[in-house]
Image (spheres, grey):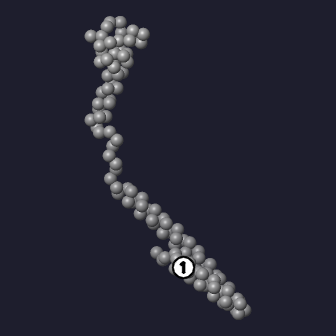
Amino acid sequence: MTDHRALTAGAALFTVSAVYAAQSHAWLPAIGLVHGAGLLAARARRERAAQRCARALAQRAELAARPSPEPPFAPSLLKEVGRAWTELNAACCLHAWLSRGTEHDPAHCHREAPAT
């Protein structure tokens, strides 16, 4: 890839040369220089966009190459949380679950017998 700054400098040089040619009433070279400056400016713009795209693709590739972060919970903790939810859903009431089955809340407990 060509450096877009060099192309931009060339376009500026062509523009200044076109101004000097126009001041000397050399219209044909002035028109050619303006045309060349426009072509160089368009090429500089494309090169700059290509460089930005290449930089973005390189950053994406670098991010994809990095290892994935650690999971927020260890697998053993996930098993323990799953077991606790199973116990909570199997409990007759929340009060019984909190007291490990020693007490029951008679207003919300669907079990008739006291806890064992």
Name the residue at 46% across, 75% down: 1
- Label 1: few (<14), some (14–19) or many (≥20) C-alpha neighbours in 10 Å: many
- Give the answer, above or below, for where 65 lies relative to 88: below
Q: Quadrant of residue 107?
A: top left
In the displayed structure, does residue 22 sit left or right of residue 36?
Answer: right
Say which element carries label 1. helix
Q: Position of residue 57 (x, y in %)?
A: 44, 62
Q: Position of residue 54 (x, y in %)?
A: 45, 66
Name the residue at 32% across, 22% down: 87
Q: Position of residue 10 (x, y in %)?
A: 56, 82
In the foreground, 29 or 16: 16
In the displayed structure, does residue 43 sit left or right of residue 69?
Answer: right
- Give the answer, above or below, for where 28 lies relative to 63: below
Name the residue at 29% across, 39% down: 74
Q: Which residue is mark 1?
A: 7
In the displayed structure, does residue 53 sit left or right of residue 21?
Answer: left
Q: Quadrant of residue 76?
A: top left
Name the residue at 36% across, 21% down: 89
Residue at the outermost right position: 25
Identify which amino acid the numbered label 1 is placed on: Leu
On-image quarter of the C terminus: top left
Residue 32 visible, this orientation: no
